[in-house]
Image: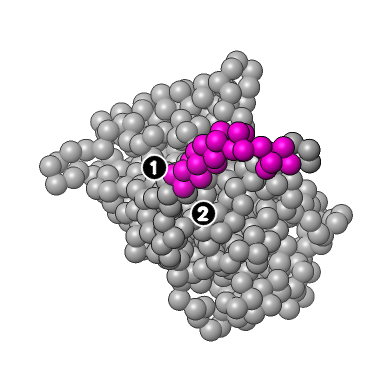
């Protein structure tokens, strides 16, 4: 207090004070003007918190149920909010219209983005990592290989996998997730290589399993780590795939079907064939995309059927399972330039996350969203509100195969078995997709034929 009075009363001390005040005011003005130039009112960032410097809100996201993280912020800030996770500033989007703008109408402004370790493991030439002509060329080929008409020939093979597996479950307790992973993997192999499997396929399967154990590991390329082992397996796997490609190109192999057959048989308008590495990265990519996704949804399907044993219509049960489980809670895009979006400013390089789960669990779009109710799909959902397979140019080309797999499983399972969940029937684990706790152990009993 004394010093304050001293300054006020001393006329000789007033000159430095005035100069100092002048500098402070000028500096404040310059800073305000600068920040206004950077983010003028019409270019304000979305509401939300960026958390702590560098770590942002990452710890908050990973220390709680991710669904609560997103829904709390959605309630607090609205349909568009900002955050900072995994070292990246992001904008989260939970309105169907805004999600459609990111994924469809303005998709040229928002490119797909993945952690660099995913690209190293799957292969940089896989479809996910591309935009433009190379992406469209691949998309047409992958889609043509998974159209219902193309899948017709695979049905008896998928059925025989289901029937053989079910036979082995008689009066046993199984880990549903583990069994669904085996099923989805076997179907993925058929869709990648066709029904007539060559001798190399067994080794390819083994190597793929080592590779996939690196997908969710720390990207530490140090001997002994899962990531290092996965990268080593990838090298061997691409070697095996190249041998197979070579043999098929020379017509020395029995197999010619599956996605591999389609990729080998294609030329672009300049008669360019796809290269061996383009083919092998995309084969690995499709197996990756088809495996844990379908296995996780099929596990939920078995849980929901168990919990709601009066439901009958298979197609709506699958639709409701995809909505309720929303195993891909969101996807990632990155702004390729500064973007003006719904009255907000999204700076170049920021990640943009359409939150599929929030949209699928919005009470305004799906009344009583937490209730499993297949009947809601007797009326078509509102436009753009239902996107379990994404939307736009990068939407899932394997959706018909995934639904077919689930339908075949549903048919044979419900006509031959009844099942009981063992242990707790509640709880979710993330690995990385949300799945019922402990992989849903169930005991199966054959239906007594009368
Ligand atoms: C129930 C199972 C599945 C679900 C929920 C699912 C979901 C999705 C979603 C949401 C996307 C879009 C990602 C984005 O926009 O960033 C996607 C892309 C993709 N999916 Fe699936 N998927 C499933 C099964 C499959 C299967 C069985 C295959 C292959 C046979 C497959 C192959 C792909 C591929 C290749 C892409 C990338 C497409 C592109 O970048 O153009 N998926 N999937």
Q: Which residues are magenta?
A: 4-30
Nearest the viewer among 319 and 164 is 319
- In primary-sequence order, the first of circles 1 and 2 is 2
Graded by Cα atoms within 10 Å as few (under 14), some (14 to 19) or many (20 or more), the crowding at tag 1 reads: some
Among the 4 quarters of the image, the one containing residue 251: top left
Q: Secondary structure at mark 2?
A: strand
Left or right of residue 446: residue 147: left
Q: Residue furthest bottom?
A: 379
Is residue 5 located in the magenta-colored stretch of the structure? yes
Q: Secondary structure at mark 1?
A: helix
Q: Which mark is residue 129?
A: 1
Residue positioned 30% across, 43% down in the render: 263
Give the dominant element type of the magenta stretch: helix, strand or loop. Answer: helix
Establish if 362 lies above or below 442.
below
Q: Position of residue 381 (x, y in %)?
A: 52, 78
Give the CA separation, mark 1 to mark 2.
20 Å
**Residue 158 visible at all:** no
Residue positioned 61% across, 72% down in the render: 362
Q: Position of residue 378 (x, y in %)?
A: 56, 83
Q: Residue furthest right?
A: 423
| Quarter occupied by the N terminus | top right
Nearest the viewer among 249 and 29 is 29
| Quarter occupied by the C terminus | bottom right
Q: Position of residue 227 (x, y in %)?
A: 58, 26
Q: Position of residue 200 (x, y in %)?
A: 45, 30
Q: Identify the colour scheme used.
A: one colour
Q: Are marks 1 and 2 in contact (CB under 8 Å)?
A: no
Q: Give the labeled residue for mark 2.
A: 91
Graded by Cα atoms within 10 Å as few (under 14), some (14 to 19) or many (20 or more), the crowding at tag 2 reads: many
Nearest the viewer among 127 and 314 is 127
Establish if 425 lies above or below 219.
below
């Amino acid at each position: 207090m004394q010093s304050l009075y001293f300054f006020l009363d001393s006329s000789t001390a007033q000159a430095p004070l005035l100069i100092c005040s002048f500098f402070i005011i000028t500096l404040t003005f310059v800073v305000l003007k600068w920040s206004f130039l950077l983010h003028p009112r019409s270019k304000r960032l979305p509401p939300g918190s960026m958390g702590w410097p560098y770590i942002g809100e990452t710890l908050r996201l990973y220390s709680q149920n991710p669904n609560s993280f997103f829904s709390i912020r959605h309630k607090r800030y609205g349909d568009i909010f900002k955050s900072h996770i995994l070292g990246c500033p992001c904008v989260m989007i939970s309105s169907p219209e805004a999600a459609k703008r990111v994924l469809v109408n303005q998709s040229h402004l928002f490119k797909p983005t993945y952690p660099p370790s995913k690209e190293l493991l799957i292969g940089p030439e896989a479809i996910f990592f591309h935009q433009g002509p190379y992406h469209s060329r691949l998309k047409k080929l992958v889609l043509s290989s998974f159209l219902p008409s193309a899948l017709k020939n695979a049905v008896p093979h998928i059925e025989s996998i289901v029937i053989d597996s079910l036979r082995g479950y008689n009066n046993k307790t199984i880990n549903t997730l583990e069994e669904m992973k085996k099923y989805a993997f076997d179907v993925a192999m058929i869709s990648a290589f066709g029904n007539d499997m060559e001798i190399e396929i067994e080794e390819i399967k083994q190597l793929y399993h080592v590779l996939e154990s690196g997908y969710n590991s720390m990207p530490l390329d140090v001997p002994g780590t899962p990531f290092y082992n996965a990268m080593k397996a990838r090298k061997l796997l691409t070697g095996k795939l190249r041998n197979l490609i070579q043999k098929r190109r020379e017509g020395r192999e029995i197999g010619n079907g599956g996605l591999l057959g389609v990729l080998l048989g294609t030329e672009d308008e300049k008669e360019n064939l796809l290269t061996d590495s383009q083919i092998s990265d995309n084969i690995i990519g499709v197996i990756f995309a088809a495996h844990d996704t379908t296995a996780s949804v099929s596990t939920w399907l078995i849980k929901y059927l168990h919990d709601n044993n009066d439901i009958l219509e298979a197609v709506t049960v699958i639709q409701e399972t995809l909505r309720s489980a929303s195993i891909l809670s969101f996807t990632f895009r990155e702004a390729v330039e500064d973007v003006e979006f719904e009255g907000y400013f999204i700076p170049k390089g920021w990640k943009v996350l359409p939150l599929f789960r929030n949209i699928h669990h919005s009470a305004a779009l799906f009344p009583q969203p937490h209730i499993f109710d297949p009947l809601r799909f007797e009326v078509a959902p509102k436009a753009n509100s239902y996107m379990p397979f994404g939307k736009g140019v990068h939407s899932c080309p394997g959706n018909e195969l995934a639904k077919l797999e689930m339908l075949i499983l549903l048919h044979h399972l419900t006509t031959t078995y009844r099942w009981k969940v063992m242990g707790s029937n509640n709880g979710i684990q993330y690995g990385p997709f949300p799945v019922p706790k402990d992989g849903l152990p169930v005991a199966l009993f054959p239906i007594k034929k009368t």
